[in-house]
C-alpha cells in the first residue's frame, strides 16, 4: 500500500478508497497491504490508472492551460492524461473553441459540449495511448492553422528538449508546434529534466511551460532560454 501511495503521488486514504472502488467494479481483488488485478480491461482501464497518477497536479495544469484560451481559438492537443484534463476543463468552462486532436477519448469528451468544434485526426489507433498516428494523421494535421498547441511531454529538459519514446509521438508533437502560433508544453514535475529516445523539438522552440514543479533549480534552465513558466495556477516571469 505504501508503494502504491508513493508511485501514484497520492495519500494512503486515497489509495484505499480507490482500491475499494476498483474492487466493487470487479477490476481488482483486495489483499493484505495491496490488491491483485483480476483481469485486464483493455486500453481504457490502463489509461484510467495513468490518469490518477499525479491527479491534483494535472488538474492544476489543465486549469492554467485553459486560462490561456480565448473564445473562438483554434487549439491543437496531442493525447495523454494531462491533455484529457485540459479537455475536461474546456467543457466545464463552456468555451467556444475548435480543437484538433489524435486522442479518441479526448475527442469523445469534447463532444459533450456543443460549443466545441472537434476534429479527430485519422490514422492508426494506438492501443496504449488511445490516440491515432501515422501518415493519415500527419497529412490531416498539416491542413490546420492554430492559435495554440498544447503538447503533453513524455520528457522535457533544456538540453534534450521535448522528447518521446516513440517516433509517432515525436512526429505529432513536431507538426503541432509547426502549425501553431504558440507552443505550450504541459508537464508534471516528474517529466522535467530527463530525456527519452527521440527529440521532437528543441527547448528553444517552446514558448510556454505549464507545470506543477516548484523546484527553482529545475525550472531555471527553462527560464534562461526565455521560456515563460506557468506554475500550476500563476504566471511567473520568464527570466
Image (cartoon, helix red, strand yellow):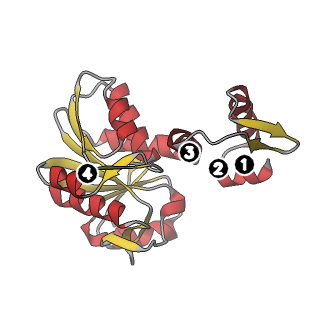
Give the numbered dot on residue 8. Answer: 2
Q: Secondary structure at mark 4?
A: strand
Image quadrant where one finds the C terminus: bottom left
Determine contact: label 1, label 2, CB under 8 Å. yes
Q: Secondary structure at mark 3?
A: helix
Give the numbered dot on residue 46. Answer: 3
> Residue at 16% of width from left, 33% of height from top?
72
Q: CA distance from mark 1 to mark 3?
A: 17 Å
Q: CA distance from mark 1 to mark 2?
A: 5 Å
Q: How many numbered marks are there?
A: 4
| Dot 2 alpha-carbon crowd within 10 angstroms: few under 14, some 14 to 19, many 20 or more | some
Q: Secondary structure at mark 1?
A: helix
Q: CA distance from mark 2 to mark 4?
A: 27 Å
Position of residue 205 in the picture relative to residue 34 (left or right):
left
Determine contact: label 4, label 3, CB under 8 Å. no
Residue 238 position (above or below residue 32): below
- Give the x, y percent position of residue 188: 49, 55
Position of residue 154 in the picture relative to residue 227 (left or right):
right
Q: Which residue is denoted by mark 4 in the rendering? A: 149
Mark 2 vs 3, N-terminal side: 2
Amino acid at each position: 500500500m505504501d508503494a502504491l501511495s508513493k508511485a501514484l503521488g497520492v495519500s494512503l486514504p486515497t489509495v484505499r478508497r480507490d482500491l475499494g472502488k476498483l474492487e466493487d467494479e470487479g477490476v481488482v481483488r483486495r489483499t493484505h497491504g495491496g490488491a491483485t488485478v483480476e483481469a485486464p480491461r483493455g486500453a481504457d482501464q490502463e489509461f484510467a490508472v495513468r490518469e490518477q497518477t499525479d491527479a491534483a497536479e494535472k488538474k492544476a495544469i489543465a486549469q492554467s492551460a485553459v486560462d490561456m484560451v480565448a473564445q473562438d481559438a483554434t487549439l491543437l492537443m496531442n493525447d495523454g492524461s494531462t491533455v484529457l484534463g485540459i479537455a475536461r476543463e474546456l467543457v466545464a468552462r463552456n468555451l467556444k473553441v475548435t480543437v484538433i486532436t489524435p486522442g479518441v477519448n479526448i475527442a469523445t469528451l469534447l463532444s459533450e459540449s456543443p460549443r466545441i468544434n472537434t476534429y479527430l485526426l485519422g490514422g492508426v489507433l494506438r492501443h496504449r495511448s488511445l490516440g491515432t498516428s501515422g501518415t493519415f494523421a500527419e497529412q490531416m494535421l498539416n491542413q490546420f492553422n492554430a492559435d495554440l498547441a498544447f503538447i503533453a511531454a513524455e520528457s522535457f529538459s533544456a538540453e534534450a528538449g521535448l522528447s518521446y519514446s516513440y517516433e509517432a509521438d515525436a512526429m505529432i508533437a513536431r507538426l503541432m508546434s509547426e502549425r501553431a502560433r504558440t507552443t505550450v508544453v504541459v508537464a508534471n514535475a516528474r517529466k522535467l529534466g530527463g530525456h527519452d529516445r527521440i527529440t521532437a523539438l528543441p527547448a528553444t522552440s517552446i514558448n510556454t511551460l505549464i507545470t506543477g514543479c516548484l523546484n527553482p533549480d529545475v525550472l531555471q534552465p527553462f527560464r534562461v532560454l526565455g521560456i515563460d513558466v506557468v506554475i500550476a495556477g500563476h504566471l511567473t516571469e520568464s527570466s
